[in-house]
Image (cartoon, rainbow, N blue to C red):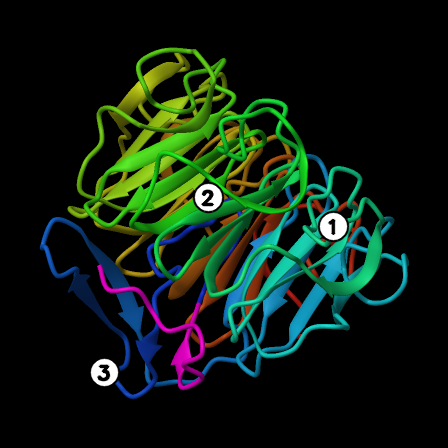
Amino acid sequence: MKKPNPVARNFLRFAGISAVVAIADKFIPLKTLAGTWTKLGNPTGSAGTWQKITATTTNRMGICAGASGNQHSVVLRSDGLVFACGYNGDGQLGTNSTTSRSTFVQATGISNAVAVACGYNFSLALRSDGLVFGSGENSHGNLGDNSASNRSTYVQATGISNAYAIASGVYHSVALRSDGLVFACGYNGSGELGDNSTTNHSTFVQALGVSNAVAITCGSNHTVALRSDGLVFACGINLDGQLGINSTVSKSTFVQATGISNAIAIAAGSFHTIALRADGLVYATGYNFAGQLGNNSTTGKSTFVQATGISNAVAVAAGGFHTLALRSDGLVFACGYNSAGQLGVNSTAGKSTFVQATGISNALAIATTRGGHFTLALRSDGLVFACGNNLAGQLGDNSTTYHSTFVQAVSP
């Protein structure tokens, strides 16, 4: 799988936390056939990615949702500017204040961004020159700026350059470098930084046990990497089998998962992990109390098993206890916990198999949250739609009303 050039400004990029979708970390030319889906295979042919391509330049190029109990959302506009809404008590919106917002406002200290990611009370942005920036809560060094001070505007991380993908967990951040190596910073009590220790780091350090990575994602306290040959590797906490290694032993370096091959995309929820296979089928491992693995049960798994109710998927995203899949026709499917309507199925009943969401079509990207119980979708016309918990205005619809079907956010 050919790695993209992070400085190519004539290409589009999508990325997000808990939403390492099939279109993440891939640059697609703007001038191409509108409204068609095409498969991009890597040079070895062992993995590929499905990508919906459109000739229409959208104004919202990337989305991510605040993780693990918090309520904020971030979108990346095609001009490289970052916008955010929702809870802002730690400065995670990057607006040089701690005032919460119910519509999207522009972040400061960042421009020319090509990817965004959200942690518990912090946000990350990847700039086109491969540098990583962050704002918000920083008590564990998760912003990577060699401090433990909160930031209300984006500041540059240290120890990382030439990055082309970012992801974040509750209190840790991960960056994938253009040479396929993984770097991480922040909380490391469960080995989620993958550096063969449980020592926190306030600057990015190299993870061990994985190379030739093409995608990364983070759970609450675990990290997952997709290798160019379609194999999945993971490290960190594993009490619920979320590493997919056929045990519940935690790991402080990356180890290969079982039950999955030919993967083209990955996503991590709080305690479960999702992989999208090149044939469009979805596989999952880990905690399953609400049916978030989508295998028509609520029994946890420590190896990857196939989900039901979904095929021809092109992207996946994982929330705290729910999972999303984007189908090749632009429809969104979901399963798992649904207390706030985060599945978008016009009810608050949980689902243990994938069912179609309502209020959204022609979707290009999906993102969700590991704790705030809400979901975002980016439509092919560049509009953002959302559903679920809206306590802090994180759905961006200028209200604090919960929604169990997708509603349009106010455009940034």
Q: Nearer the viewer, residue 317 or 266?
A: 266
Give amino acid for label 1. Answer: Asn
Question: Do the numbered discs 2 and 1 sit on residues whose CB atoms are within 8 Å?
Answer: no
Give amino acid for label 2. Answer: Thr
Residue at 73% from the left image edge and 46% from the top image edge: 71
Secondary structure found at label 3: loop
Residue carrying label 3: 33
Is residue 380 visible in this depiction of the protein? Answer: yes
Image location (x, y in percent) of residue 88: 83, 53
Which corner quadrant holds the C terminus? bottom right
Is residue 360 visible in this depiction of the protein? Answer: no
Residue at 46% from the left image edge and 58% from the top image edge: 165
Q: Earlier in the sequence, mark 3 or mark 2?
A: 3
Question: Do the numbered discs 1 and 3 sit on residues whose CB atoms are within 8 Å?
Answer: no
Image location (x, y in percent) of residue 159: 59, 54
Q: Over which residues does the magenta segment extend? A: 1-13
Residue at 75% from the left image edge and 72% from the top image edge: 109
User: Could you say which disc has been placed on residue 146 in the image?
Assistant: 1
Tell me if 150 is positioned left or right of 304 in this view: right
Residue 193 falls in which quadrant of the image? top right
Alpha carbon separation for disc pair 3 and 2: 30 Å
Residue carrying label 2: 217
Image location (x, y in percent) of residue 323: 44, 37
Q: Is residue 3 magenta?
A: yes
